[in-house]
Image (cartoon, grey):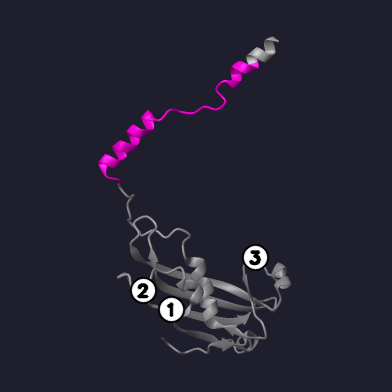
């Protein structure tokens, strides 16, 4: 792990100094992300680190902004083949610092808000947010093919569908409606 950055920064002081922080964070240190990753002991890719850079500054409206770029290989479980694979992630975005949830309505569309309390921002949580946004909803290993059923199972299913009687609960309704119209 590279420690060229503090754990906690004051975004306003960092923006005043046009500070730039970078380094790596172990994926295991990011608790919410770790819940989405493949187990470390399943023989797949080992959990590595996420490399990041955060550049603080002000925009033309005077808002404190942070340009965040993150790069990592996330070990995920393919939902098609159930194999562990490494999902390569490279993400960059610009966030704006807010101190109250009500301020997020005033944030320009080009930015994502990040809530900061007591002038303290954990850089690792900023990295974790970017990685969480990059995790696919349904992880799928590139090149994973459709799972194939054994031939005898697929034939059995097709035969079973042909034998099952189709239940039509409203089939007699048309006849009843015609009888009612005649009355």
The answer to whether mark 2 and mark 3 are in CB contact below 8 A is: no
* Label 2, label 3: how far apart the Cα atoms are: 38 Å
| Magenta segment includes 97 | no
Whether residue 146 sits left or right of residue 107 in the image: it is left
Main SS of residues in magenta: helix
155 or 7, which is in the foreground?
A: 155
When asked about the image quadrant of residue 103, the answer is: bottom right
Q: Residue at x 72, y 69 (%)?
A: 106
Nearest to the eye among marks 2 and 3: give it.
2
Task: Characterize the local packing of mark 1: few (<14), some (14-19) or many (20 or more) Cα atoms within 10 angstroms.
Answer: some
Task: Characterize the local packing of mark 2: few (<14), some (14-19) or many (20 or more) Cα atoms within 10 angstroms.
Answer: some
Mark 3 residue element:
loop
Task: Characterize the local packing of mark 3: few (<14), some (14-19) or many (20 or more) Cα atoms within 10 angstroms.
Answer: few
Q: Earlier in the sequence, mark 2 or mark 1?
A: 1
Q: Which residue bears the numbered disc 1?
A: 28
In the image, residue 22 above or below residue 167: below
Q: Earlier in the sequence, mark 3 or mark 1?
A: 1
At which x and y percent is residue 46? 34, 75
Q: Which residue bears the numbered disc 2?
A: 40
The answer to whether mark 2 and mark 1 are in CB contact below 8 A is: yes
The answer to whether mark 3 and mark 1 are in CB contact below 8 A is: no
- What residue range appears in magenta? 149-177
When asked about the image quadrant of residue 183, the answer is: top right
Q: Which residue bears the numbered disc 3?
A: 109
């Amino acid at each position: 792990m590279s420690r060229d950055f503090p754990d906690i920064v004051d975004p306003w002081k960092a923006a005043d100094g046009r500070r730039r922080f970078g380094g790596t964070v172990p994926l295991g240190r990011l608790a919410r992300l770790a819940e989405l990753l493949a187990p470390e002991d399943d023989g797949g890719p080992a959990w590595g680190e996420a490399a990041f850079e955060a550049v603080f500054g002000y925009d033309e409206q005077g808002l404190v902004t942070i340009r965040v770029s993150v790069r990592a290989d996330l070990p995920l479980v393919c939902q098609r083949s159930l194999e562990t694979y490494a999902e390569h992630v490279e993400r960059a975005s610009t966030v704006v610092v807010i101190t109250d949830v009500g301020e997020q309505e005033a944030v320009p569309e080009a930015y994502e808000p990040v809530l900061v309390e007591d002038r303290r921002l954990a850089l690792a949580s900023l990295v974790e947010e970017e990685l969480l946004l990059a995790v696919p909803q349904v992880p799928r290993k590139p090149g994973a093919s459709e799972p194939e059923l054994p031939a005898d199972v697929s034939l059995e299913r097709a035969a079973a569908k042909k034998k099952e009687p189709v239940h039509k609960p409203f089939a007699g309704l048309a006849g009843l409606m015609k009888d009612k119209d005649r009355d």
